[in-house]
Image (cartoon, grey):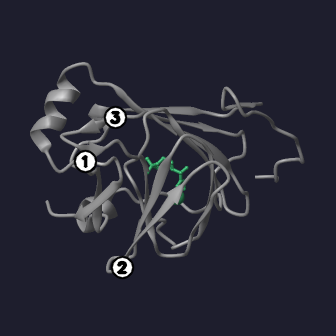
Amino acid sequence: TPPVSPFAIAFDAERLTLSPEGPTLTRRMSDLEGLFLDQSAWAESAAGDNPVVYTVTSSPVPEINRELPQSITTIFPGATAGELWMTKGHQHPDHQGEIYLALKGRGGLLMFDGERVEWLDMTPGTIGYIPPGWAHRSVNTGDEPYAFLAVYPGGAGHDYGWVLTHGMGSRAYLDASGSVDLRPYAG
Ligand code: F6R
Ligand code: ZN
């Protein structure tokens, strides 16, 4: 495959759109099976109004080796049995690193290397660095959509099974004062 030619992307910081734009992915509650602690609350929501939990809008850069794709993830505010809405989370099979830049709203970047857990508060302007070998999941901790830009190696791949097997080390809730409450993963 010949490399992509240089090009500019117009980014609308208000509407969080890219132009030109690549594929957009929509993850509904039914796409998040096995991820929330309370499986019956998840099942009820998935079988009910099945809300959109997050979207991922990509630039037109292909996900192949040596390319450097970008995407914008927008997680809607919400919780399922108290557990804050989040991305599925994944590990990169070859343990490649990644950079996130928070754009809008409030969120968190939860990382787990199989033993250690790290949490980064993400507010507009925060750059979150995901080192090689750390599985990563994003969480909306606020009451408006939380959006961030991701830049990652095109050949990184996404291993979603790793999270189903190993978990993410912690789960994110809010305490009575509205602060993030990280609880042991369990389940
Ligand atoms: C790419 C990356 C992000 C996520 C996106 C959705 O490597 O980390 O672009 O893919 O935030 O999360 P997942 O892929 O876990 O559903
Ligand atoms: Zn990633």
**Most foreground residue, 168 or 96:** 168
**Most foreground residue, 20 or 51:** 51
Element marked by disc 3 = loop
Q: Amino acid at mark 3?
A: Gly
- Residue visible at 34% across and 47% down in the picture: 178
Q: Which residue is mark 3?
A: 78
Element marked by disc 2 = loop
* Among the two numbered marks 2 and 3 on one chain, the one whose residue lies closer to the N terminus: 3
Element marked by disc 1 = loop
Q: Which residue is mark 2?
A: 116
Position in image of residue 40 (x %, y %):
9, 38
| Spatial separation of the CA atoms under disc 3 and disc 1 | 16 Å
116 relative to 156, above or below:
below
Q: Which mark is residue 146?
A: none
125 relative to 66, above or below:
above
Position in image of residue 115 (x %, y %):
32, 80
Ligand 2 within 8 angstroms of badge 2 C-beta: no
Q: Residue furthest top?
A: 49
| Spatial separation of the CA atoms under disc 2 and disc 3 | 26 Å
Image depth: mark 3 or mark 1 in front: 1
**Most foreground residue, 19 or 63:** 19
Relative to 78, 16 lies left or right: right
* Among the two numbered marks 2 and 1 on one chain, the one whose residue lies closer to the N terminus: 2
* Among the two numbered marks 3 and 1 on one chain, the one whose residue lies closer to the N terminus: 3
- Residue visible at 41% across and 59% down in the picture: 90
Q: Which mark is residue 176?
A: 1
Image depth: mark 2 or mark 3 in front: 3
Relative to 94, 78 lies left or right: left
